[in-house]
Amino acid sequence: MNPRTIEYFIYLGNVVIAILIGLALGALIIWMGGYDPIEAYIGLFETSFNLQDPYYISSTLSYATPIILTGLTFAISARAGIFNIGAEGQLYMGALGAVLIAAINPPPLIALPLALITGLLMGALWGLIAGLFRALRNVNEVVVTIMLNWIAFWIVEYARTYGLGDPRRQEKTISMPPSARLPLLVKGTELSTAFIIAILVAILIYFVMWRSKIGYYIRVLGAGVKSAKYAGINPTKTTLYVFIIGGALSGLAGALEICGRPPTYAITTGASNIAGFGFTGISVSLLGLNHPLLIIPAAIIIGGLTAGARGMQIRAKVPLEMVMAVQGLIIIALSVPGLTFLYRRWKIKKALRGGEHA
Amino acid sequence: MPELDLLGSILFYTSWAMMPILLAALGEILTERSGVVNIGLEGIMLISALFAVYVADKTLNPWLGVLTAIAVGALIGAIHGFIAVYLKGNQIISGLGINTFAMGFVAYSIEVFWGVRGYYTPRPEAKVPRIPGLGVSPLFLVTLGVAVLLYFYLYRTHSGLRLRACGENPEAADVVGVNVELTQFIATVIGGALTGLAGASLSIDWLASITKQLPAGRGFIALALVNFANWNPLYALLGSFIFGFLWTASEYMKNISSIVQVIPMPLINTIPYIATLMVVAGVIGKSKPPRSVGTPYRRELD
C-alpha cells in the first residue's frame, strides 16, 4: 500500500476509536444518571439504523440533511485554517429568508426556488459579515461567529413576534405555502428531496475544493498566510470567499429545513426546530476529516444519533440531550489523533533502525 | 436597592454582570500567556454552574457550591491541559468538544438531578449572601482581587516571567530550565478553576438559576475581552466594566416602555453581542497575542 492510503486508514482508525470512546463514556454517564446504558443504546439504534422499518432510516437521513451542509461550512473554513463556528446563525438567517418569501406569497411556480435562493443569500450575507470582521479587523472568528449566532437568534425571534408570526398560532412563524414545499422522498416520513440536494452540493463542493481556483486558494491559505502571499494569493479576499461560501451553504440548509420538514414548514418558538444543526455540523465535519465527501457518511452517523435520541428516551427514559454530550465526547477524543501519533513514531523508529543497519 | 438613583443602580448591577466575564477572561489570560488556548470557557462555565447549583442547593451552603464549581472548572481545565500539553492534541477542537459536551450534559443533568426539563432555580438559601452594608457580592471583591494579583504575578514576579516566556518562546524558556509542559498544564488548570468560579458567580450568585444556555455567549465574550485587554489583567478589568455596563444597560432598557416601543424586546437582547463586536473590532488591530499560543511545544522529535 502506498503511504497516503495507509495514512488515510489510520485517520479512519482515529475516527472509529473516537466514536467508541464517545459511546463508552456516554454509557458511563447514562449509568451514573441511574439509567440502563444498554437499553438506551438499543433504543437509540433501533430507531435510527433499523433497516426493517423505512421510517427510522428516513428519519436518520432527514436529520443528516442540514448537517451535511453545516458540516461543509465548517470544513471549508477549517481547510483555510479558519474556525467558522457560525453555521448556527447562518442557518437561522437562511430559515428566516425562506419564511420571508412565504410572507410575500409569490406565484406558486417560483415560490420554492425563490425561498431557497433567498435563504442561501441571507446565509451568505451573515457569513460575509463575520468574514469582514475577521479579514479586515483581524477579530478572532470564533468570537465573531458566536456573537453573530446570538444576534441571528434574536433577529429570528423578533421576526416571529413582529410581523412574520402565524396569526393563528403564536408559537411559530407563518408556514411555507404548499407550492414552496419540497416533495417527500418517502411518504409518511420527514425525508424530502432536500437530502438529494445536500448530497449534490457536497459533491459540488468537492469539485470546488479540488478542481477550482477558489478551492486551491482556500487550501493554500490553510497552509499558512505567508505561503498564500508567496503564491500570490490575496488572503483577505480568500478569507471572504470562505465565509461567503460557508454562509451560503448553511443558509441553504436553513431554507431546506423550512421548505422540507413536515409538519410545520415554519420556524417555531426559540428557533427550537432548527437550533443545534449548526453546531452539530462541527462534529460532522471533524468526524468526516473536513472532507466534503466523507462528510456525507459522517452526517448520516450523527443524523442517526439525533434521530434515535427520542427512541432512546422512550425506551430507557434517558433525556434525549444525552446524544449531544456523546457528540462532545467524540469531538474531544478526536482532538488527539492517537493512532497517527503512534504511526509516525513507529515510522521514525523504523527509519532510525534502518540507518543503523546501513 | 430602591434608594439608589438610576446610574447608581446600573453600576450596582454592572458589578454582577462583569464578574463571570472577567473571571473567565482572567483565567484565559493566564492560560494563553503560558501558551495554551482554551475556547471551551463557555462549556466550563456551564458545567461548573450546574454543579454549583447542585451542591449549594443540596447542602444549603453556597460556599460549598462555590468550591465545587472551582474544583469542576479545574478538573475540566486539567483534561484540556492534558490533551493540549502532554498529548499535543488540537486545542481548538478540544475546546469545541468541551462546549458541545457541556450543552448536552447540562440539559441531561438538569433532568437527572431535579426531574425537570430545561430549567431549575435553587432555593434562596443556596444563594451567595451579599456583603452587609455594601450590597455587592463577596465574589465581586474576590474577582477584583484576582485581577490585581494576576497582574502582579505576571509582571512583577520571577515565576510570572517564566510563565510568560513559555507562551512567547518556549524553546528559550526550556533552555533556561523552565519546565514548559508543567507550567502550561498548571496554568490551564488554574485558568479552568477561575472559569469554574465564573460559572458559580452566574448560577448561585447573580442569575441564581441553571439552564443549558445560562452563559449565553459570555464564555466567548470573555475570549473577546482577552483580545481587547491585550492579555493584560488590568485592562481586562477595565474592559469587563465596559462589557458588564453594556449588558446591564440593555437589561435596564427592557424596563423602560418608551424604549421598548422604539426598539422591540428581542432586538434589545442583541445589544451586548453587537457592542462586543464593535468594541473588539475597534481595538483589536493593536493587540498582540503571545507569540506561540495554541501550538503544542515539543522538546524534540517524538
Image (tube, rainbow, N blue to C red):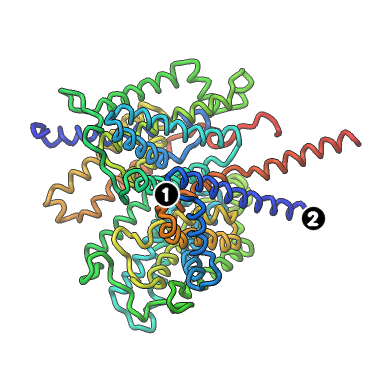
* Quadrant holding the N terminus of chain A: bottom right
Secondary structure under tag 1 reads: helix
Q: Residues within 10 Å of mark 1 (few under 14, many from 20)?
A: many
* Quadrant holding the C terminus of chain A: top right
Residue B239 locus on image (x, y percent): 32, 34
Q: Residues within 10 Å of mark 2 (few under 14, many from 20)?
A: few
Q: Chain of mark 1?
A: B
Query: Amino acid under label 1?
Result: Gly
> Is label 1 on the same chain as label 2?
no
Residue B172 locus on image (x, y percent): 61, 23
Asked whether, in this view, residue B166 is left or right of residue B43, the answer is: right
Query: Amino acid under label 2?
Result: Met
Q: Is residue B64 visible?
A: yes
Q: Reply above or below: B128 against A255.
A: above
Taking depth in this image into account, of A108 and A279 the one nearest to the observer is A279
* Disc on res. B184: none
Which of discs 1 and 2 lies nearer the camera? The answer is 1
As drawn, which residue projects farthest toward the left?
B3
Taking depth in this image into account, of B36 and B51 the one nearest to the observer is B51
Q: Chain of mark 2?
A: A
* Disc on res. A1: 2
Q: Residue at x 35, y 48 (%)?
A: B111
Taking depth in this image into account, of A235 and A313 the one nearest to the observer is A313
Residue B216 locus on image (x, y percent): 33, 46
Asked whether, in this view, residue A220 is left or right of residue B229, the answer is: right
As drawn, which residue projects farthest toward the right?
A358
Q: Residue at x 33, y 73 (%)?
A: A101
* Disc on res. B104: 1
Residue B144 locus on image (x, y percent): 31, 25
